[in-house]
Image (cartoon, grey):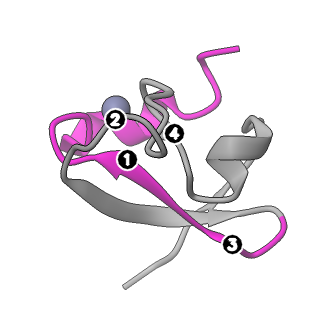
Amino acid sequence: MAEEIITGLTPLQADGLACVVCGADYLHIRVPQVPVGRSATGSQVFACASCHLPDTQRMRGALQ
Ligand SMILES: [Zn+2]
């Protein structure tokens, strides 16, 4: 599987602690998560299963 390097993340997103699509804080919000790639630091990053639709990867970094 190709792993995308996702940039423009918040510190929580880059540590895999928040959804890279909607920004949900996984320390406080319990939702199913799916790995979607890696941050620029090499950490695996996640999105909510409900956020991770095929086209939503295009939205990465668009939340700032
Ligand atoms: Zn989400």
Dot 2 amino acid type: Ile
Badge 4 is on which residue? 20
Q: Nearer the viewer, mark 3 or mark 2?
A: 2
Name the N-terminal-most of marks 4 and 3: 4
- Separation of residues labelled 4 and 1 (CA atoms): 5 Å
Which residue: 38% across, 66% down?
A: 35
Residue extent of the magenta highlight = 41-64
Q: Are marks 4 and 3 in contact (CB under 8 Å)?
A: no
Q: Residue 64: horizontal and vertical position, in percent?
A: 71, 14
- Separation of residues labelled 1 and 2 (CA atoms): 12 Å
Q: Are marks 4 and 1 in contact (CB under 8 Å)?
A: yes
Q: Are marks 2 and 4 in contact (CB under 8 Å)?
A: no
Is the CB of the residue bearing disc 4 within 8 angstroms of ligand 1? Answer: yes
Which residue: 26% across, 43% down?
A: 30
Asked whether, in this view, residue 3 is left or right of residue 34, the answer is right
Q: What secondary structure is found at the residue carrying circle 2?
A: loop
Local packing at callout 3 (Cα closer than 10 Å; few below 14, some 14-19, many 20+) is: some
Name the N-terminal-most of marks 4 and 1: 4
Write down which quadrant ligand 1 falls in: top left
Local packing at callout 2 (Cα closer than 10 Å; few below 14, some 14-19, many 20+) is: few
Q: Residue 39: horizontal and vertical position, in percent?
A: 71, 61
Label at residue 43: 3
Q: What secondary structure is found at the residue carrying circle 3?
A: loop
Badge 2 is on which residue? 29
